[in-house]
């Protein structure tokens, strides 16, 4: 059975004409070539997609490569692994299958069908990327009839394999990309065929039984770790049945299902598993001895947990361990011990819960810190670098920091391993400066593992330097695209798909502004009211709602006069110039999504809510974490943020994406291609036990961060911003500041200082954030409202109750 793609070339690039007699389709076989570099990603590019006996012309081959990249991109965005190369040992699908279904079409259009087909009939759902993979042959007993055959390419999400040149018959596979349940792909073409991205795995042939001991819980007794509980799974492939029984009984069940009843095997395997688990825990305890009381969660911890994954295979009459790995987060989730800890509110927990929850987080962070110990990291620009960061990096992470900074008297110059005084403020010369810095690094013989920056102004320079030194980082082109707000939206608006849903759904109309003539033109392209802001700005400085033409011209002229260069307002991006843009204003609630992306894969996402701003300005007023959005809306926000990052080519890093949830779904405000600012790192660490700073440094060194698979917040935080213009008396009073610090030390509020000096001005950023915790948003909100009224933060011109109204 063949399914042909009828898509329009305006939205996608069809694989060929419905007539397979050799007539050219609208794209393939002609002179039109696919767009280059459409699908950036970490997957292998040296893929042999040639079909034996039916070579493609250069133009047709370019389209086949294009669709292969599209398939990989679709799998990546769906969170599925890259296709695997099984060309040397192609699989033949499920025995007894009566139908093999081949789709000659776009991977993005038919991805859901391919995935479901791989689930229902693993190995028998084929994706054909080129008409050249199809050949007419005479059907048995029907002269003039035809069957399809094509080069072998087997994969996962809808890509199956068969011998090259084999005809499609009942129960057989011809060469194509086949879907299998499990999530992997393979290419059965003749010769070397790298993996294609898919999300399904073919079932292992034969009667072997997979036995997974998916969680081992160990308890400390005295100074000795002892195995105390096992949660096991027994079954074929992923069809595992969980048994909350003793290890000997579970192994007995596995052996019995295979017809084995040898008690000697049970005893031997039990002993080996116990010894391995207890030895692993002993190693963890050795590290535990170096933790302070505070790092242990405020008291000495007497109970520890360790998850150990064993995958055992039964072949013949022998049960053999195949895989062993530590997996503490999964272990505790599987045993049900972690569910209550993640969901428990921060206040009112039992002593055991209070001890165990920080321990789980500490174990995951510690694994990352061990990997980072001794790594050499170059930081570009001291913006965002605090004494606390330098101290933490040296003490907690074991990093050796080197700093490039324009200010020779910056405090960090005395705290880092190497200080390089270099002017990083002239961003029009970033490419030249990157080459000069690379030479300085080589001259000083610095053996760097990574390079990164907290400072928006230096992100492009950092990417250029990483390219010069061969260090991990998103590409300079991606950083430039995300750095300039109008370019971000205009680029995403052009991304009409594939893959789908297209990122154009999340971008809004906008127009760059450099002159008064641009303002007049923009008013005819962008619906009003609109938002006018600096192209390279940060902190919402100079951002304003404009309702008509006169307001547009007035605000544009005022910004060009008041904010001409870095000296007028340091640290907000004026080193890149004071160009502006006008963008469409959309109604909805505002949210931040903080992402950890590694190799184009989403590892973690944290969504927070923002309160209403003081229009016509957009300076942040209040925030709540975790989000109060419904789960499906939260998922939409995460996917929109992730797809926008991928659409710009941001494949590695910790990114902060600002969006609005509107009646038409998530709409992008802007992408900050670095770790979220203000209080976000502190809040995420407190609520989820995930350190974005550690994740940033690990990704910069090419290491995948150790993160919990499904982090759950231990309560809620609701915070309010304090502004110099509104709270100068409070913030300048030594007594009031001492009171806030005392409340912070007692755990009654969280105080995050965001600026070092009280500098009043027309264009201001928040000075500090005051937050309270609770078991629900309402509880945290009421506590914060009471504290704000007591401290004087709540006032007629700064109505805290209004700013917190979204968090009821």
Image (cartoon, rainbow, N blue to C red):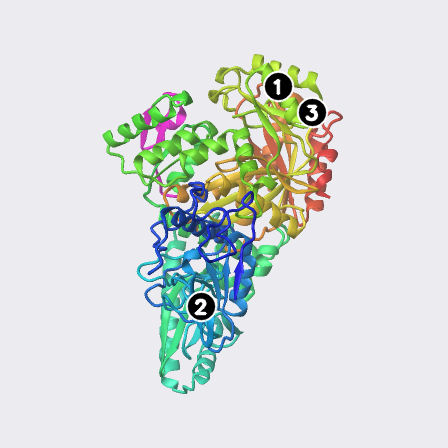
From this view, report whether residue 324 is shown above or below residue 372.
Answer: below
Q: Which numbered marker is on residue 616? A: 3
Of 478 and 191, nearer the camera is 191
Q: Residue furthest top?
A: 561
Q: Residue at x 68, y 49 (%)?
A: 776
Q: Which numbered marker is on residue 202? A: 2
Q: Residue at x 54, y 47 (%)?
A: 605
Residue 536 in the image, given as x and y percentages of width and height: 52, 26
Instruction: Estimate the spatial distance between the alpha carbons at disc 1 and disc 2, rounded to whole Å.
Output: 58 Å
Q: Residue furthest right?
A: 796
Residue interval drawn in magenta: 396-421
Q: Secondary structure at mark 1?
A: helix
Q: Tell me the quarter of the image containing the C terminus.
A: top right
Of 758 and 519, nearer the camera is 519
Q: Secondary structure at mark 3?
A: loop
Identify residue for label 1: 519
Q: Is residue 295 left or right of residue 738?
A: left
Return the disc, 3 or 1, that comes first in the chain's sequence.
1
Magenta-colored stretch includes residue 410 = yes
Q: Secondary structure at mark 2?
A: loop
Residue 349 in the image, given as x and y percentages of width and height: 61, 55
Of 774 and 539, nearer the camera is 539
Q: How many marks?
A: 3
Badge 2: residue crowd in 10 Å (few <14, some 14–19, many ≥20) = many
Magenta-colored stretch includes residue 435 = no
Return the disc, 3 or 2, that comes first in the chain's sequence.
2
Return the disc, 1 or 2, that comes first in the chain's sequence.
2
Q: Does residue 303 appear anywhere in the picture? A: no
């Amino acid at each position: 059975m063949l399914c042909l793609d009828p898509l329009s070339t305006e939205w996608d690039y069809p694989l060929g004409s419905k007539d397979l007699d050799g007539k050219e389709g609208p794209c393939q076989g002609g002179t039109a070539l696919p767009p280059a570099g459409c699908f950036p990603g970490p997957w292998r590019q040296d893929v042999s997609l040639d079909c034996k006996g039916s070579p493609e012309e250069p133009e047709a081959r370019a389209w086949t490569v294009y669709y292969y990249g599209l398939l990989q991109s679709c799998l990546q965005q769906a969170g599925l692994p890259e296709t695997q190369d099984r060309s040397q040992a192609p699989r033949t699908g499920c025995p007894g299958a009566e139908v093999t279904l081949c789709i000659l079409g776009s991977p993005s259009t038919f991805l859901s069908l391919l995935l479901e087909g791989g689930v229902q009939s693993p190995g028998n759902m084929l994706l054909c990327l080129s008409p050249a993979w199809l050949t007419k042959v005479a059907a048995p007993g029907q002269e003039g009839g035809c069957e399809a055959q094509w080069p072998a390419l087997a994969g996962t999400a809808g890509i199956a394999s068969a011998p090259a040149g084999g005809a499609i018959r009942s129960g057989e596979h011809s060469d194509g990309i086949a879907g299998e349940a499990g999530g992997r792909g393979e290419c059965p073409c003749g010769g070397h065929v790298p993996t294609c991205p898919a999300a399904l795995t073919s079932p292992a042939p034969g009667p072997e039984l997979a036995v997974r001991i998916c969680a081992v819980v160990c308890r400390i007794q005295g100074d000795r770790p002892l195995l105390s509980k096992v949660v096991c799974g027994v079954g074929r492939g992923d069809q595992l049945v969980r048994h909350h029984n003793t290890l000997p009984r579970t192994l007995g069940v596995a052996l019995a299902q295979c017809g084995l009843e040898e008690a000697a095997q049970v005893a031997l395997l039990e002993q080996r598993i116990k010894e391995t688990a207890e030895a692993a825990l002993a190693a963890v305890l050795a590290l535990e001895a170096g933790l302070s009381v505070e790092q242990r969660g405020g008291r000495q911890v007497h109970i520890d947990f360790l998850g150990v994954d064993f995958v055992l295979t039964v072949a013949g009459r022998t049960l053999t361990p195949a895989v062993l790995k530590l997996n503490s987060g999964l272990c505790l989730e599987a045993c049900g011990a972690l569910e209550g800890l993640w969901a428990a509110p921060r206040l009112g927990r039992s002593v055991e819960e209070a001890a165990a929850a920080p321990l789980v987080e500490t174990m995951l962070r510690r694994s990352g810190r061990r990997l980072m110990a001794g790594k050499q990291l170059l930081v570009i620009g001291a913006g965002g670098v605090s004494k606390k960061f330098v101290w933490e990096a040296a003490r907690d992470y074991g990093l050796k920091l080197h700093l490039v900074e324009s200010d020779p008297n910056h405090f960090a110059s005395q705290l880092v391993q190497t200080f390089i005084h270099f002017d990083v403020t002239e961003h029009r010369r970033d490419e030249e400066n990157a080459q000069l810095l690379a030479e300085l690094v080589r001259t000083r013989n610095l053996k760097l593992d990574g390079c990164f920056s907290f400072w928006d102004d230096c992100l492009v320079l950092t990417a250029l330097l990483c390219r010069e030194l061969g260090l991990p980082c998103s590409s300079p082109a991606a950083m430039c695209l995300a750095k300039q707000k109008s370019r971000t939206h205009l680029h995403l608006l052009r991304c009409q798909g594939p893959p789908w849903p297209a990122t154009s759904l999340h971008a809004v109309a906008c127009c760059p502004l450099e002159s008064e003539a641009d303002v007049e033109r923009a008013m005819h392209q962008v619906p009003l009211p609109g938002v006018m802001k600096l192209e390279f700005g940060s902190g919402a400085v100079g951002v304003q709602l404009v309702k008509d033409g006169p307001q547009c011209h007035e605000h544009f002229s005022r910004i060009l006069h008041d904010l001409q260069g870095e000296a007028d307002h340091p640290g907000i991006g004026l080193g890149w110039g004071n160009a502006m843009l006008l963008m469409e204003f959309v109604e909805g609630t505002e949210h931040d999504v903080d992402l950890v992306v590694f190799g184009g894969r989403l590892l973690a996402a944290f969504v927070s809510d923002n309160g209403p701003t003081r229009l016509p300005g957009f300076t942040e007023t209040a925030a709540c974490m975790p989000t109060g959005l419904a789960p499906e809306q939260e998922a939409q926000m995460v996917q929109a943020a992730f797809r926008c990052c991928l659409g710009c080519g941001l494949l590695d890093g910790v990114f902060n994406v600002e969006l609005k949830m509107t009646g038409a779904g998530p709409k992008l405000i802007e992408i900050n291609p670095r770790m979220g600012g203000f209080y976000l790192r502190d809040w995420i660490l407190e609520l989820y036990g995930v350190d974005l700073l550690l994740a940033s440094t690990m990704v910069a060194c090419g290491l995948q961060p150790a993160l919990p698979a499904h982090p759950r917040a231990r309560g809620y935080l609701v915070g309010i911003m304090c502004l110099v213009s509104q709270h100068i008396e409070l913030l300048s009073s030594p007594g009031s500041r001492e009171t806030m610090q005392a409340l912070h030390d007692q755990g009654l509020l969280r105080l995050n200082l965001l600026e070092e000096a009280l500098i009043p001005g027309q264009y201001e950023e928040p000075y500090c954030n005051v937050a309270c915790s609770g078991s629900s948003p309402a509880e945290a909100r009421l506590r914060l409202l009471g504290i704000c009224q007591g401290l004087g933060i709540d006032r007629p011109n700064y109505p805290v109750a209004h700013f917190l109204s979204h968090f009821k």
